[in-house]
Amino acid sequence: MLSQFLKIVIRDMVVLGMRDVVNFEGSLLALGAIQARMNEMYVMTGGDVPELAMRVPGMSPDEFNALSHELNYDFDDDFRETVTAYEIGGVSLGGIWFGQGGEYLRCLKRMNIRSGHDEVWWADDLDRPLSYLMIASTDSYIVLLDSENGFVFSFERGRCWHTMDKVADSFSLLIRGAGSLFLRRKLAVNKKALGRNVAKQVGGNMVFDQFWVGLACGYI
């Protein structure tokens, strides 16, 4: 009898076509499709893998407005629409962690408010750069949102945030790229090509594609 996971993989191959799944020549998965498939896997594990739990809905409008005020940050519409539609706190997509457990609202506060002597992503700068907010991380990178244009950037851990490079045109594209990569990576023949294709589709810096290539290959 086929496992539930194998049934999901076979269904994707039929719906998307073998060539699209293996070579990632199609479009990015929509947020709703990613959430539904993550939920399938979460249920399949009996709820024992919380990092698969991408839930709906997300923050309430009042919670979002209070967060914006507390962080003194002017969020763009794409970010607001995404985090009020989906709860992604503690979710892991293709190696990108959206906080370390709990509601995303609390994760954002922990990542961006200095507490005692805890290390912060802006390192030796006295105050957090007001235009940027840490929204996610990988084992090797810190991921930031730019309030001026909604772009998403990353920089290597241990380096200054000024060294950041663009990895996506928006927060929702970051999630769509990460989710598409995560759900299709196992069948990719050429994982480096998969990473480069995702980088291109989300608007990442194609000179600096090691972020998405690293995620596709599983080494960042």
Image (cartoon, rainbow, N blue to C red):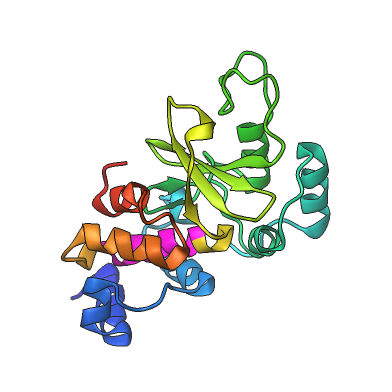
Q: Nearer the viewer, residue 16 or 43?
A: 16
> What percent of the width, then of the height, locates residue 76?
71, 57
> What percent of the width, then of the height, locates residue 205?
42, 54
Q: Is residue 172 left or right of residue 69?
A: left
Residue at the image position 53 percent from the left and 73 percent from the top: 32
Residue farthest to the top? 117
Residue at the image position 21 percent from the left and 81 percent from the top: 18
Read off the magenta span. 174-185
Q: Is residue 17 left or right of residue 133?
A: left
Question: How many numbered badges does the structure rendering display?
Answer: 0
Tell me, yes or no, if residue 209 can be seen here: yes
Which image quarter: residue 10?
A: bottom left
> What percent of the width, then of the height, locates residue 104?
62, 47
Which image quarter: residue 220?
A: top left
Residue at the image position 21 percent from the left and 66 percent from the top: 188
Q: Nearer the viewer, residue 91 or 146?
A: 146
Q: Point out the image quarter for the N terminus.
A: bottom left
In the rendered image, residue 183 lying in the magenta stretch gets the answer: yes
Q: Nearer the viewer, residue 121 or 49?
A: 121
Tell me, yes or no, if residue 43 can be seen here: no
Residue at the image position 35 percent from the left and 62 percent from the top: 181
Q: Is residue 196 above or below residue 29?
A: above
> What percent of the width, then of the height, locates residue 216?
29, 55
- Magenta stretch, main secondary structure, is helix
Q: Is residue 54 left or right of residue 84?
A: left
Q: Is residue 75 above or below residue 112?
A: below
In the rendered image, residue 165 lying in the magenta stretch gets the answer: no
Which image quarter: residue 183?
A: bottom left
